[in-house]
Image: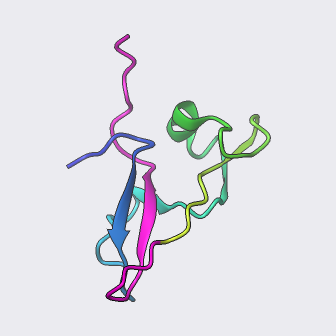
Amino acid sequence: MDAFIGLICLFPQNSYNTFVPRGEWMRCDGRTLQVSRYPALYAVIGREFGGNGSTEFAIPNIPPLKPANGGDVDYYICINGIFPQDNS
């Protein structure tokens, strides 16, 4: 199932990261990305979370959740999927 680019979801973590579809999602850790490498994601979020807005931009920095029963649940942003349409 394809998700919308820019969608943020929670994924449970383990040592193998088997729950996160590779190449489609990126952990929301505030990293800076190149506009030329992720043009669709940049078109959706722009420089809302940082970057210079011409050659680089940042994804959100959202700390993982720590459930009471242990483990981590991390936020991920969809970087490869369906481009959202503006139907307004």
Give the image location of residue 43, x and y in percent. 55, 31
Q: Which residues, given as a range, are shown in magenta? A: 65-88
Q: Tell me if 86 is positioned left or right of 38 in this view.
A: left
Q: Give the quarter of the image for residue 47.
A: top right
Q: Residue furthest right?
A: 52
Q: Residue furthest left?
A: 1
Please report the residue visible at 44 percent of the width from the left and 69 percent of the height from the top.
74
Please report the residue visible at 49 percent of the width from the left and 71 percent of the height from the top.
64
Give the image location of residue 40, x and y in percent. 50, 36
Q: Give the quarter of the image for residue 53.
A: top right
What secondary structure do most residues of the magenta stretch adopt?
Answer: loop
Please report the residue visible at 36 percent of the width from the left and 84 percent of the height from the top.
68
Give the image location of residue 12, x and y in percent. 33, 74
Vertical side of 74 occupied by 76: above or below? above
Which quadrant holds the C terminus?
top left
Q: Residue furthest front?
A: 68
Vertical side of 21 occupied by 17: above or below? below
Vertical side of 45 occupied by 13: above or below? below
Please report the residue visible at 53 percent of the width from the left and 60 percent of the height from the top.
28
Give the image location of residue 9, x and y in percent. 37, 56
Q: Residue furthest top?
A: 88
Q: Tell me if 79 is positioned left or right of 30 in this view.
A: left
Q: How many marks?
A: 0
